[in-house]
Image (cartoon, rainbow, N blue to C red):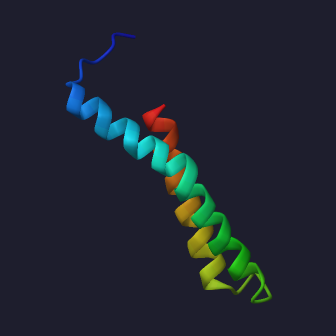
Amino acid sequence: MAGQQLSRAAYERLKAEFDDLTTRGRIEVAEEIEAARAEGDLRENAGYHAAKDKQGHMEGRIRQLE
C-alpha cells in the first residue's frame, strides 16, 4: 500500500487528535458509560446506548488514524 504524503502541519494535527482520543477521549467515554450503568437497567437506558455508540465511533476513528 502506497503511503500518502502529509504536510508537517497536517501530521501534527492528526497526531494531536490521536493522542487526545487515546487518552482523554477514552477516559471520558469510560466515565460516561460508568455513570449510565449506575442508573440501572441497561436495556432501556438511552444514556448507556449513546455512550457505547460514541465509544464505537471514537474507536473507529482511532483505528483510522493508526
Which is nearer the eye, 43 or 28? 28
Residue 35: quarter of image = bottom right
Residue 52: quarter of image = bottom right
Q: Residue at x 69, y 81 (%)?
A: 36
Residue 45: quarter of image = bottom right
Location of the N terminus (image quadrant): top left
Q: Vertical placement of 26 versus 53: above or below?
A: above
Q: Position of residue 11 (x, y in %)?
A: 30, 30
Q: Position of residue 41 (x, y in %)?
A: 79, 87
Which is nearer the eye, 53 or 66? 66
Q: Residue furthest top?
A: 2
Q: Position of residue 15 (x, y in %)?
A: 39, 36
Q: Vertical placement of 29 versus 42: above or below?
A: above
Q: Position of residue 24 (x, y in %)?
A: 54, 57
Q: Residue at x 48, y 43 (%)?
A: 19
Instruction: Please indicate whether residue 46 sits to the left or right of residue 66 in the image.
Output: right
Instruction: Please indicate whether residue 56 sits to the left or right of residue 15 in the image.
Output: right
Q: Vertical placement of 55 versus 18: above or below?
A: below
Q: Residue at x 62, y 60 (%)?
A: 27
Q: Residue at x 53, y 64 (%)?
A: 54
Which is nearer the eye, 29 or 23? 23
Residue 14 visible? The answer is yes
